[in-house]
């Protein structure tokens, strides 16, 4: 089996000079890019909303039901694929972090809480009335993308930002009870973890980088995520291990080494303890 690919935005908009943005209706997207129905990753942010049809969407080994009103927001590197009904439709949008951050400057994409890896679901559901309210944004953005009017990129970016604001408002309504003073530290911890989990496995390192005690970091993780710091770090490592194990050309020993484990047997024991299976069993029995 070949390695699961990581697709760039250029793969989808090869005829467009803008390599940092792509939008299409979902139906047309599948006509021109049928390969996306196989498991894959993206090097960009992905925003998808379904307006018709049904199916399932698997993201990093969690499965979600697709219905009209289902929205998914994914970060670069997440593995996903879908099984879709013939009448599926909606919108799919790809955009780079660099494009968003450079345009707005005073705010960055990671201010939106639904793009946090820790403790947040990549799924949101819009009821019929809510879908009717947000769907025109996608129609307008697609019209701008396909047209050639002046200030095209400005219009697209502002529509995209408006969509993010609408999502953030709905997200806050759903998670209002979870708003906490610790959220800023969790966000900073998430950024550090994404950068260093390959080499730094100890919770003390992250506490030091955050300029707080390990006891305080454990308190934050327990309060917000209901996990210890060690469990959070381990979960991130195991997620990447699962992603890498889907590439059957790579040996388990190579994967363990890439993840910073000198002791191959310890890596196997850790995966079995955390995921409930050995690498060989997971690789043979998992079909995302």
Image: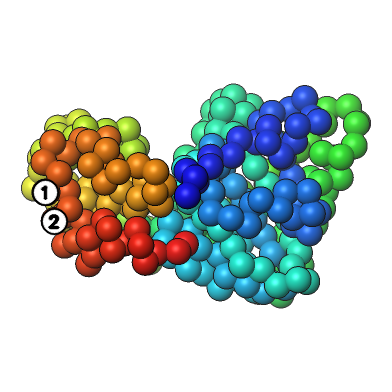
Q: Which colour scheme is used?
A: rainbow
Q: Name the image quarter holding residue 45.
A: top right
Relative image position of residue 217 (x, y in whole percent): 16, 46
Q: Is residue 123 above or below residue 201?
A: below
Identified at 67% across, 60% down, the residue is 49
Q: Determine which of the numbered discs, if any, sits on residue 269 in the image.
A: 2
Q: Is residue 210 visible?
A: no
Left or right of residue 10, residue 240 in this image: left
Identified at 75% across, 32% down, the residue is 14
Which residue has dot 1 on it? 266
Q: Name the image quarter holding residue 26.
A: bottom right
> In the image shown, does 245 or 23 lie closer to the viewer?
245
Relative image position of residue 19 (x, y in whole percent): 69, 28
Say if mark 2 contacts mark 1, CB within 8 Å. Answer: yes
Labels in figure, total: 2
Identified at 68% across, 36% down, the residue is 11
Mark 2: few/some/many CA within 10 Å (<14, 14-19, 20+): some
Q: Is residue 25 above or below residue 22?
A: below
Q: Name the image quarter holding residue 133.
A: bottom right
Left or right of residue 180, residue 82 in this image: right
Q: Is mark 1 on a helix, strand or loop?
A: helix
Find the distance from the CA under tag 2 to the CA under tag 1. Answer: 5 Å
């Amino acid at each position: 089996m070949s390695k699961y690919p990581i697709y760039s935005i250029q793969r989808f908009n090869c005829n467009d000079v803008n390599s940092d943005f792509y939008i299409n209706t979902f139906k047309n997207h599948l006509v021109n890019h049928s390969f996306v129905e196989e498991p894959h990753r993206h090097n960009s942010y992905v925003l998808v909303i379904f307006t018709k049809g049904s199916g399932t969407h698997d993201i990093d080994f969690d499965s979600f039901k697709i219905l009209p009103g289902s929205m998914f927001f994914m970060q670069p590197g997440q593995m996903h694929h879908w099984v879709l009904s013939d009448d599926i439709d909606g919108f799919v949008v790809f955009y780079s972090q660099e494009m968003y951050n450079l345009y707005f400057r005073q705010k960055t994409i990671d201010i939106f809480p639904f793009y946090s890896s820790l403790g947040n679901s990549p799924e949101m559901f819009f009821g019929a009335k809510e879908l009717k309210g947000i769907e025109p944004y996608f129609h307008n953005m697609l019209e701008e993308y396909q047209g050639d009017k002046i200030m095209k990129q400005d219009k697209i970016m502002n529509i995209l930002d408006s969509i993010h604001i609408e999502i953030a408002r709905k997200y806050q309504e759903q998670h209002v009870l979870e708003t906490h003073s610790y959220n800023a530290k969790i966000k900073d911890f998430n950024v550090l973890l994404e950068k260093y989990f390959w080499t730094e496995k100890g919770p003390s390192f992250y506490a030091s980088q955050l300029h707080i005690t390990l006891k305080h970091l454990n308190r934050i993780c327990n309060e917000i995520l209901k996990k210890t710091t060690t469990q959070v770090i381990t979960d991130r490592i195991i997620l990447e291990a699962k992603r890498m194990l889907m590439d059957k050309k790579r040996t388990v020993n190579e994967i363990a080494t890439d993840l910073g484990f000198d002791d191959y047997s310890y890596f196997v024991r850790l995966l079995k303890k955390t995921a409930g299976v050995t690498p060989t069993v997971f690789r043979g029995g998992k079909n995302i």
